[in-house]
Image (cartoon, rainbow, N blue to C red):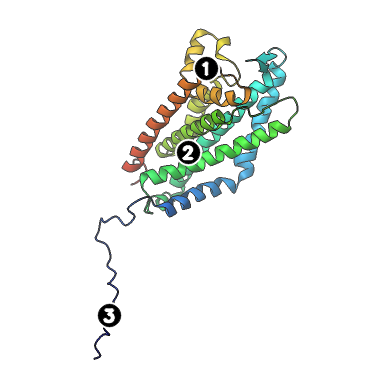
Amino acid sequence: MAAPKSGSHNPPLQRHPEPGVVLIASVNWQGLQTLYLKEVRRFFKVQLQTIWAPAITTLLFLVIFSFALGGQRAEVLGVPFADFLGPGLIVMGMIQNSFANSSSSLLVAKVQGTIVDVLMPPLSAGELLVAFVGGAVTRAWLVGLAVWLAMVLAPGVHVPVRNILPIIYFGSMGAVMLALLGVLTGIWADKFDHAAAVTNFVVQPLTLLSGTFYTIDRVSPLLATLSAANPFFHVIDGFRSGFIGTANGDIATGAGLLLGCNIVLWVVCYRVLSSGWRLRA
C-alpha cells in the first residue's frame, strides 16, 4: 500500500454534534426570512380581502362621517373636519389589520394542525415573534398606504404629509402593539369565536373611543380621562399630528407610553412563546 504523499492534507472527518449542542449560535436569519415571507405571502395572496377591502371600508367611514358631521363641525384643531378625520381613519385601519393578521395566522395554524410546521424548525421564540410581528406590520403599512392614496385622489379631503417622523413612529408603534396583542390572542384562542370576542370587546371599543372622530376637549371629563389613558388615543393623535401639524395631547407622553406598552407586551409574548403554552401538547 502506497504511503501518502508528503505534505498531503486529509480533511477531518465530519462529526455529528452532541445532543443539545446549538448549531446556530446566533440569529437564524434564513429561517427568520422564510417565516416572514410566508406571513407576507399568506395575506398578499388574498390582497383583495386583506388590503383593498379595509381601504374601501375606511373610505366609507370618511364619507359617512364627513357628510353627517361635517356641516356641524366645520373645523377641528384648526383644519376642516374631513382633514382631521382622514389620518385617524388611516391609522385605525392599520392597527386593526395588524391585529387581524397576527391573530389569524396563529389561530388558523392551530385549527388546521399546521402549527407544528412553525414550532419544529430551529427558530427561537424571539425569531418567531419578529416574523409574526413583521408580517403584521407590513400588512398594516400596505393598508395605510392604500387608504392614503385613495384619500389623496378623493375630493373634499386633504391629507398632505407635514412631518414624516411622527407618522412613521406612531404608525409603526401602533401596528407593533396590535400585532403583539394579536399574537397573545392567537395563542390563547382555541376557536374563531375567541378571537372575535377580543376584536369586538377590546380592539373595537378602544379604537372607537380613542379620539378618531372627536377631540377629547369636546367630551365629558370622565371620557376625556379615559381617552387620555387609552394607548390607542396616543397612536391616533400622534399619527394625525404628522398630517395636520397639531396634536390633541402631549406627543412626548404618548411616545413614551407606547414604547413602554410595546416593551411589556414583547416580554409577555416572548415568555408565552418560550413556554409553549397552548401551543404544544
Camera-side mark, 3 or 1: 3
- Which residue occupies the extreme top position in the image? 221
- Quarter of the image holding residue 126? top left
Cα separation between marks 3 and 2: 61 Å
- Disc 2 on helix, strand or loop? helix
Residue visible at 65% across and 15% down in the picture:
78
Identify the mark at residue 103; answer none if there is no mark: 2
Mark 2 Cα-neighbour bin, 10 Å: few <14, some 14–19, many ≥20 = many
Residue 206 visible in rendering: no
| Type of amino acid at the residue the image marks with label 3 | Gly
- Which residue occupies the extreme bottom position in the image? 1
Q: Position of residue 80 (x, y in %)?
A: 69, 18
Identify the mark at residue 4; answer none if there is no mark: none
Q: Is residue 127 above or below residue 212?
A: below
Q: Is residue 186 above or below residue 6?
A: above
Camera-side residue of 249 and 261: 249
Camera-side mark, 1 or 2: 1
Identify the mark at residue 249; answer none if there is no mark: 1
| Type of amino acid at the residue the image marks with label 1 | Gly
Q: Position of residue 91 (x, y in %)?
A: 57, 30
Q: Nearer the N terminus, badge 3 or badge 2?
A: 3
Residue visible at 60% across and 46% down in the picture:
46
In the picture of the structure, the residue carrying the numbered disc 3 is 7
Cα separation between marks 1 and 2: 30 Å
| Type of amino acid at the residue the image marks with label 2 | Ser
Q: Is residue 215 above or below residue 101?
A: above
Q: Position of residue 118 (x, y in %)?
A: 42, 50
Left or right: 143 in relation to 125: right
Q: Position of residue 228 (x, y in %)?
A: 48, 17
Camera-side residue of 202 and 71: 71
Left or right: 144 in relation to 8: right
- Disc 3 on helix, strand or loop? loop
